[in-house]
Image (cartoon, rainbow, N blue to C red):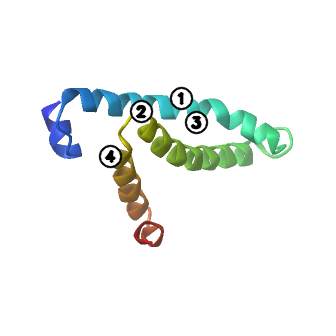
Amino acid sequence: MKKLKERWGVESNWQIIVILIVFAVTGSTASYIGKPILNGLNITSESISTFGYWVIRILLLFVVYQFMLVFFGWLFGQFNFFWNFEKKMLRRLGLKRLVDQ
C-alpha cells in the first residue's frame, strides 16, 4: 500500500481502496453496457464480421471506460485523482492537444 500511496500521490489507505473500487466498478459497468450500445447501433457479429465486431466493441469500450472512469471517480469523491489519471493516459496515447486545451 505504501508504494501505491507514493506512486499515486494519495495520503490514506482508505483513498486507495476507494480508487480500486472505482476501477473495478468502471470496468464492470463499461463491459456490461457495451453489448446493448452496439445492439442499439445494429452492430452485431451477424451483421459484420466477427473480427470487425470485436474491434468495434473494444474501441467502444475503451472510449466508454474513459468517460465512466472520471464520472465514477467524481461520484466516489476522487475526481481530481481520476481527472489527472485521464490526462496522463491521453498524453501517453499522443493526444496531448486534448489535454492541454
* Picture disc at residue 28: 1
Please tell me whether mark 1 sits on a helix, a strand or a loop: helix
> Where does label 2 land, which residue?
22
Residue located at (81% from left, 45% from top): 41
Q: Where, quadrant-wise, is the C terminus in this rendering?
A: bottom left
The vertical placement of 3 against 59, above or below, is: above
Could you tell me residue 11's position as x and y percent? 17, 37
The earlier-in-sequence mark between 2 and 3 is 2
In this view of the protein, which residue sits in the foreground, 16 or 4? 16
- Which mark is in front, 3 or 4? 4
Task: Report how far apart the C-alphas of labels 1 and 4 lie in the structure.
Answer: 20 Å
> Where does label 4 land, which residue?
81
In this view of the protein, which residue sits in the foreground, 16 or 43? 16
> Where does label 3 land, which residue?
30
Task: Report how far apart the C-alphas of labels 2 and 1 lie in the structure.
Answer: 10 Å
* Picture disc at residue 44: none
Could you tell me residue 32's position as x and y percent? 63, 29
Circle 4: is it few (<14), some (14-19), or many (20+) Cα within 10 Å? some
The vertical placement of 60 against 3, above or below, is: below
In the rendered structure, which amino acid carries the disc numbered 1? Answer: Ser
- The answer to whether the residue labelled 3 contacts the one labelled 1, judged by CB atoms less than 8 Å apart, is yes
